[in-house]
């Protein structure tokens, strides 16, 4: 009896962890039914900001990454960090060495934002470059960076 109860509990747990799939109605009775993935955000109560620097250009130059007036992270060559953002609305992501680079964002809960941080050669010195990239490319670039202990 005890083993049966554990087995049933395990199966229910696995069933609740499986992704929800919504079935679309077929337009004709002879057509195959297609499945549409549920588009409910994985984290509807907050947004996630992924920042990364995946190049070695200007590797000796590091900079602080700011969100509005708060320092988020010290960007070094081949570094990455994820941040949970609980508030919605406009924010300014910025960094500064000799020159300042700004990236205005409008944060929405439930979304992931990938920001690539680079160093670009300006007139005389390297300056930070911040670029919002699409989720597919950003996730691939972010995950390609080996985790470092901080």
Image (cartoon, rainbow, N blue to C red):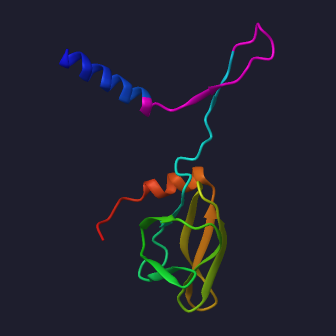
Vertical comparison of 4 with 97: above or below: above
Image quadrant assignment for residue 77: bottom left
Q: Name the residue: 58% across, 54% down.
A: 110
> Which residue shows up at 41% across the image and 82% down it?
60
Q: Quadrant of the C terminus?
A: bottom left
Locate residue 49, reporting x and y percent: 53, 64
In front of the other: 127 or 47:
47
* Residue 76 x, y percent position in the rendering: 42, 75
Quarter holding the N terminus?
top left
Q: Is residue 86 left or right of residue 107?
A: left
- Give the main secondary structure, helix, strand or loop, of the magenta stretch: loop
Residue sitting at the far left: 2
Looking at this view, is 110 or 105 the one in front?
A: 110
Whether residue 81 sits left or right of residue 133 in the image: it is left
Is 16 on the left-hand or right-hand side of 87? left
The question of residue 18 being in magenta is answered with yes
Q: Residue at x 43, y 31 (%)?
A: 16
Q: Is residue 75 above or below residue 28?
A: below
Q: Quadrant of residue 115?
A: bottom right
Q: Is residue 81 above or below residue 72?
A: above
Judged from this view, the residue extending furthest toward the right is 28
Q: Which residues are magenta?
A: 16-32
Quarter of the image for residue 111 reads bottom right
Indicate whether 137 appears above or below 132: above
Toward the front, the furthest residue is 1
* 35 in magenta: no
Residue 28 horizontal/vertical position (percent): 80, 12
| Along the viewing direction, whichever of 76 and 35 lies nearer the viewer | 35
Q: Position of residue 85 (x, y in %)?
A: 52, 66
Q: How many marks?
A: 0
């Amino acid at each position: 009896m005890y083993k049966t109860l554990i087995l049933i509990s395990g199966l229910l747990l696995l069933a609740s962890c499986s992704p929800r799939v919504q079935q679309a109605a077929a337009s004709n009775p002879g057509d195959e039914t297609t499945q549409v993935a549920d588009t409910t955000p994985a984290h509807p109560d907050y947004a996630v900001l992924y920042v990364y620097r995946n190049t070695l250009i200007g590797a000796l130059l590091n900079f602080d990454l700011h969100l509005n007036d708060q320092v988020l992270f010290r960007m070094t060559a081949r570094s990455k960090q994820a941040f949970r953002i609980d508030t919605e609305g406009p924010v300014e992501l910025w960094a500064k060495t000799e020159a300042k680079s700004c990236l205005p964002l409008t944060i929405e809960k439930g979304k992931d934002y990938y920001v690539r941080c680079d160093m670009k050669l300006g007139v005389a010195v390297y300056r930070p470059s911040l670029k919002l990239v699409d989720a597919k490319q950003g996730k691939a670039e972010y995950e390609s960076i080996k985790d470092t202990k901080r």
